[in-house]
Amino acid sequence: MRFVGPGCPQVRVGLLVGLLVLGCIAPGAAADEDPILARAFEVHHRPVADAADLIGSLLSPEGKVTFSPRLTTLVVEDHVSVLDRVGALLESYDLPPRNVEITFSLFLGTDRREDERKTPASGNELAQEVRGVLETLSNFTKWETYESLGSRSVTGREGDRIVADLSDEYRVVFSVDSVHESSGTVKFERLQLQRFRIDEDGAENVENLYTAGAVLEPGKLHVVGAAKDPDSNRALFLMLQAASR
């Protein structure tokens, strides 16, 4: 048998055409398996704009999202596989606001070397965990004596702005940004410790002593401190503990 002659090029051309045809069909078949469609998602409990930002990272280069704040609806156009992932993410995100209980305890720390008249906060009046934290602070800071200025537990939910008076002079103002569903971690975008007083005309004067964001792990005691300057012999210590409800 000879491998030359007019028949041989025809066979080779036929094979080449066949491969080209198969190469053209394969992408179309894949597209049919994961077509681009549009799907509407209703957002009931969260700002629809926040939900749109959340799913943005899931979209393919061909994907896009539009929304109507008035209708609280997202319309997502993308591959079916992407739409399925978007639906699963929104289902875990769009949940009713969760409640959280936060306990605040405020103490005035004093450098005992400068003011021997102050006495430590009574251990009988404090929870064991709080007393242990104060003893630890005394070991590592110059503020060795602590006076309790007030304590309070408040319950709020995600999105609420809460004002909690700890005494006639001090209060905490905060908003619960989010409560992590699985871990129970509570996030505050802005938490303020304020000193306030009412003057003779009835006007309220407010001094912001401490402002910061905070992330609290459930069941753990967190401590923040504030002093006028490093050389001050007095400082405020705010203890926070959160529990999701």
Image (tube, grey):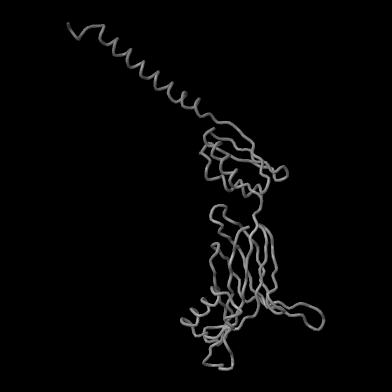
Which residue is farthest left?
Answer: 1
Place of residue 28 in the rendered image (x, y in percent of width and height, measured from the top left): 47, 24
**Viewer-proximal residue among 225 and 4:** 225
In this rendering, the answer to whether 234 lies above or below 174 is: below
In this rendering, the answer to whether 13 lies above or below 233 is: above
Question: Residue sitting at 61 percent across and 79 percent down?
Answer: 125
* Quadrant of res 154: bottom right
* Quadrant of res 103: bottom right
**Viewer-proximal residue among 139 and 21:** 139
Which residue is farthest right?
Answer: 201
Question: Residue sitting at 73 percent across and 78 percent down?
Answer: 205
Place of residue 2 in the rendered image (x, y in percent of width and height, measured from the top left): 17, 7
Place of residue 96 in the rendered image (x, y in percent of width and height, measured from the top left): 66, 50
**Viewer-proximal residue among 34 and 89:** 89
Which residue is farthest front?
Answer: 124
Question: Residue sitting at 52 percent across and 85 percent down?
Answer: 144
Q: How many marks?
A: 0
* Quadrant of res 164: bottom right
User: Which quarter shows the N terminus?
Assistant: top left
From the viewer's perspective, is 6 left or right of 140?
left
In this rendering, the answer to whether 192 lies above or below 144 is: above
User: Which quarter shows the C terminus?
Assistant: bottom right
Place of residue 38 in the rendered image (x, y in percent of width and height, measured from the top left): 61, 33
